[in-house]
């Protein structure tokens, strides 16, 4: 435990604490309305969002891998938590959050933090924009003051509910929502240090209480009075059947929580020129999500906007995050009953503005205008998030991204068939492109450029096999520009070796990088080829080949004698690199 905090508080002084205290209070003020709004949108009581901010906010700051991270309930979780709440109920939502916390801890302990960076940007932007659309649409009913609306998990079903109950529109609710919205927009321009959402809620709630108290539904009328008592410990009932049932929802919470928290930590790094510890961040998130459900809180993660505010407010250590949690807790004890008077119509524009800010609209438009495979991944992920579920969207988006990546990588593979050419009398001797008019029937040499992986392995095999059928005595494969080879590539390579050696040929490999050679050594392919058939330089491989052929049969090489060919062999390695693009007769 001592090592966990090593270096984070070295040289910490009273002056630093004063900065953290101020930053924590500012972030706490911002977090209070968001905590209630996110909880309500997730289908649970507003105080559960406050509990989450108090407990998870402090734990994430203390145990996480970023000095400036502010954790709590976030908008990204709303569609997932609401779906779990409708399907399984509040008690099981707590179980799912606890399981997600365990998964996050395991991800951190197995050092999977860096793997999150491999999730393609179009997938992240796609589901983030989709979540923003869902959040925004989910607040339309409250903004308009519609009554009798039943919330559903599906986007289309919720739009149908709005259409069916549009005749119950409440002009008082619209007025209150517009007042809150205008205040939130105007406040940053005139009072930049005052949280617009908090000021909007206070003024619009005061106006509603004075003039429209009987006409506008409030948090109190919808959820009852917010309790000012501290959260109490409660262990959710868990059975093996329940755990199996909730593993999938918990995994979605864990993955999204990991992505959101690490993205927030990266933003903090960019603002402070610091470096977070991704694996420790996941462990901190896991600890917070294990403990928070035990006190009634919902899943939490790093909040980008609140983290950025924390930094801009002068925070210097995780203490600011702890202060933010304590401040929200004290506010709960002192002012909770007054929060019950906040109109639901006032909460709607708060969440709508959150949705607008998290929509990634600029990145969305930029990727879309590229009109590449990334644009397709973005659109598919976005549409599936809105119209199906986040789980389906991320799964399909990742699969599609992998397929497109494999296609791009396969297009990088270049196979060139080359031999020494003495036909250019006025130029330095360079390898020539083998064609029907000029060929060496006993030696075939190929230059392979690009990765030999599952997307290109079959084409590699087919190209080489076409030459093997002409029964050359020696086959030289130049692999100096092959960065890696996977098991599929190894399998097809092995097929070539076995087929060629079976017909009595000798296969030579030249220029293989140490990493590639190590990969081959881990399999029996290295032994099948033979250690003596691996060469560092193509010239050495060609000399070896020339020693194993019958020169009288080399009728195709009429332009030069055998001894000339031997003299030219050492030049092949150097000259081939300069002419790779000119010697390609097949590009996949």
Image (cartoon, grey):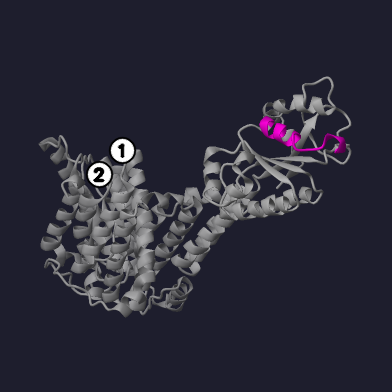
Q: Nearer the viewer, residue 130 or 55?
A: 55
Q: Quadrant of residue 56?
A: bottom left
x then y, percent, for residue 80 = 38, 67
x then y, percent, for residue 184 = 31, 53
Q: Is residue 139 left or right of residue 290?
A: right
Q: Which residues are magenta?
A: 539-553
**Residue that appears at 30% across and 57% down:** 301
**Residue that mark 1 sits on:** 274
Callout 2 secondary element = loop
Task: Confirm whether residue 183 shows in the render.
Answer: no
**Residue that mark 2 sits on:** 67
Counting labels gives 2
Question: Where 81 falls versus 437 (above or below)?
Answer: below
**Residue that appears at 14% across and 69% down:** 233
Question: Where 122 falls versus 208 (above or below)?
Answer: above
Question: Where 477 falls versus 129 (above or below)?
Answer: above
Q: Is residue 238 left or right of residue 392?
A: left
């Amino acid at each position: 435990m001592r090592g966990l905090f090593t270096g984070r508080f070295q040289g910490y002084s009273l002056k630093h604490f004063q900065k953290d205290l101020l930053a924590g209070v500012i972030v706490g003020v911002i977090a209070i309305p968001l905590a209630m709004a996110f909880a309500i949108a997730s289908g649970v009581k507003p105080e559960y969002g406050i509990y989450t901010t108090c407990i998870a906010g402090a734990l994430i700051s203390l145990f996480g891998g970023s000095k400036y991270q502010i954790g709590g309930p976030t908008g990204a979780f709303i569609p997932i938590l609401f779906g779990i709440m409708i399907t399984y109920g509040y008690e099981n939502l707590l179980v799912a959050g606890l399981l997600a916390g365990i998964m996050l801890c395991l991800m951190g302990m197995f050092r999977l933090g860096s793997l999150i960076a491999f999730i393609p940007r179009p997938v992240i932007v796609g589901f983030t924009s989709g979540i923003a659309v869902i959040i925004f649409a989910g607040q339309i009913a409250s903004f308009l003051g519609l009554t009798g609306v039943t919330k559903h998990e599906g986007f289309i079903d919720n739009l149908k509910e709005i259409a069916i109950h549009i005749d119950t529109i409440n002009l008082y609710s619209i007025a209150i929502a517009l007042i809150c919205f205008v205040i939130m927009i105007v406040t940053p321009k005139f009072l930049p240090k005052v949280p617009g959402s908090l000021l909007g809620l206070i003024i619009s709630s005061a106006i509603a209480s004075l003039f429209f108290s009987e006409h506008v539904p409030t948090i109190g009328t919808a959820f009852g009075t917010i309790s000012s008592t501290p959260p109490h410990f409660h262990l959710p009932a868990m059975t093996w059947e329940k755990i199996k049932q909730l593993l999938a929802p918990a995994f979605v919470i864990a993955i999204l929580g990991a992505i959101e928290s690490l993205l927030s930590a990266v933003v903090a790094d960019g603002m402070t020129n610091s470096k977070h510890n991704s694996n420790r961040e996941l462990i901190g998130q896991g600890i917070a999500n294990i403990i928070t459900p035990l006190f009634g809180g919902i899943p939490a993660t790093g909040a980008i906007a609140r983290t950025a505010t924390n930094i801009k407010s002068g925070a210097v250590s995780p203490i600011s995050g702890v202060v933010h949690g304590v401040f929200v807790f004290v506010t709960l004890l002192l002012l909770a009953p007054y929060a019950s008077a906040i109109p639901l119509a006032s909460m709607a524009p708060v969440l709508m503005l959150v949705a607008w800010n998290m929509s990634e609209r600029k990145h969305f438009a930029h990727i879309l205008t590229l009109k590449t495979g990334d644009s397709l991944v973005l659109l598919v992920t976005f549409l599936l998030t809105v119209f199906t579920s986040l789980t389906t969207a991320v799964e399909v988006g990742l699969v599609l991204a992998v397929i497109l990546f494999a296609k791009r990588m396969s297009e990088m593979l270049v196979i060139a068939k080359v031999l020494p050419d003495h036909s250019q009398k006025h130029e330095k001797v360079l390898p020539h492109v083998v064609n029907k008019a000029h060929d060496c029937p006993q030696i075939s040499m190929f230059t392979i450029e690009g990765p030999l992986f599952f997307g290109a392995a079959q084409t590699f095999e087919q190209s080489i096999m076409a030459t093997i059928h002409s029964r050359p005595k020696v086959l030289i494969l130049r692999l100096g520009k092959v960065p890696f080879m996977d098991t599929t590539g190894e399998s097809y390579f092995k097929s070539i070796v076995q087929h060629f050696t079976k017909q009595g040929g000798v296969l030579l490999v030249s220029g293989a990088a140490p990493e590639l050679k190590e990969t081959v050594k881990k399999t029996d392919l290295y032994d099948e080829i033979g250690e003596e058939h691996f060469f560092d330089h193509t010239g050495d491989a060609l000399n070896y080949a020339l020693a194993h052929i019958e020169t009288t049969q080399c009728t195709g090489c009429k332009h030069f004698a055998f001894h000339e060919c031997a003299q030219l062999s050492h030049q092949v390695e150097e000259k081939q690199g300069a002419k790779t693009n000119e010697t390609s007769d097949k590009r996949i």
